[in-house]
Image (cartoon, rainbow, N blue to C red):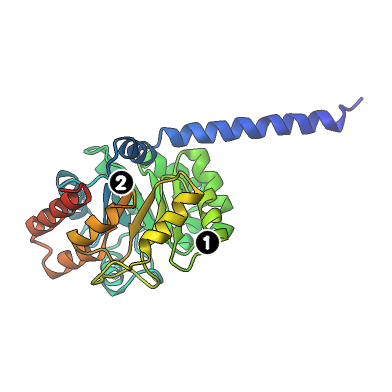
Amino acid sequence: MSRPRAAAGTRRSAARPAAARASAAALRDNRLVRALAAARMGGRRVLVPYIMAGDLDAAATERLVELLVAAGADAIELGVPFSDPIADGPVNQRAGFRALARGMTLGRALALVARIREHTGVPLVFMTYYNLLLRHGLAAFCRDAVAAGLDGVITADLPPEEGDALVAEGRAAGLATIFLLAPTSTDARIRSVAGASSGFIYCVSRTGVTGVRDEVPPELAELVGRIRAATETPVCVGFGISRPSQAREVARYADGVIVGSALVGMLEEDPEDLGRVGAFVRDLKAAVSGR
């Protein structure tokens, strides 16, 4: 005699909480999640510099990450180049095209992470585009990313409403999935992003693409406040922060500050002047720390 349908349903219901508990445990062990939780407990703000993987070359990118960590970076965001970088401004677009010309791919970026991980425990996050992850395979990407030592992924062109598969695979593997919010985001979108994000929520300081800006929008503090009211997940602000004074201002109300185009622009102007890059990151770290 076959078993009642209810018994099978009960087994499925019991399996779902078990899977959820396993996913939650995997994320608790995530370096990015732990680093941001520790910073919040200690009343500290984090600095997250962005560079494009392979912009100079893979070996130079490794050395650059070591320099950024020594200068005070709390986490590193690595761009993975894509042929149609719709969220990137001109500076980061040019860096991506240089990286593509030098042969950087998603697979090579993962290999780069594995080499970097031999020298540092600082959290590492990719910023890239969904097509690359789909081509690799979502489950395979999340497994390979965690095996290499990656802690999170920002997929600039993936809205949370279409991100269920990536979120599920990421949580199962222990990879944080980070989604973006902008000044135009509604309360409903904030709740949606909060539900899909782990590690942190990426708050875009203004509409448009990445790039250096002269000032922090006055309405940014209110936006961060709206996000904080909807979630306990840390909020990091990026897009347009290019000076220590701006970083200091944003650190008053956000959990972290992301700086990209200003750094990438320095490397574009003079790839050999890493001392200038290190000094800039130290100044940013001091500003974020309130010094």
| Residue 80, image quadrant | bottom left
Q: Position of residue 22 (x, y in %)?
A: 54, 31
Callout 1 crowding tier (Cα within 10 Å): few <14, some 14–19, many ≥20: some
The correct choice, above or below, for 108 with respect to 115 in the image is below
Q: How many marks?
A: 2
Residue 53 seen anywhere in this rendered image of the structure: no
What amino acid is at disc 1?
Answer: Pro
In depth, the one of 102 and 125 nearer the eye is: 125
Q: Name the residue: 56% across, 31% down.
A: 21
Residue that numbered label 2 is attached to: 113
**The N terminus - image quarter:** top right
Numbered disc 1: secondary structure: loop
| Residue 35, image quadrant | top left
Q: Is residue 54 left or right of residue 138?
A: left
Q: Earlier in the sequence, mark 1 or mark 2?
A: 2
Residue that numbered label 1 is attached to: 159
Q: Position of residue 262 (x, y in %)?
A: 21, 65
In depth, the one of 63 and 51 nearer the eye is: 51
Indicate which label's residue lies in the foreground, 1 or 2: 1
Residue 243 seen anywhere in this rendered image of the structure: yes
What amino acid is at disc 2?
Answer: Val
Q: Name the residue: 37% across, 37% down.
A: 37
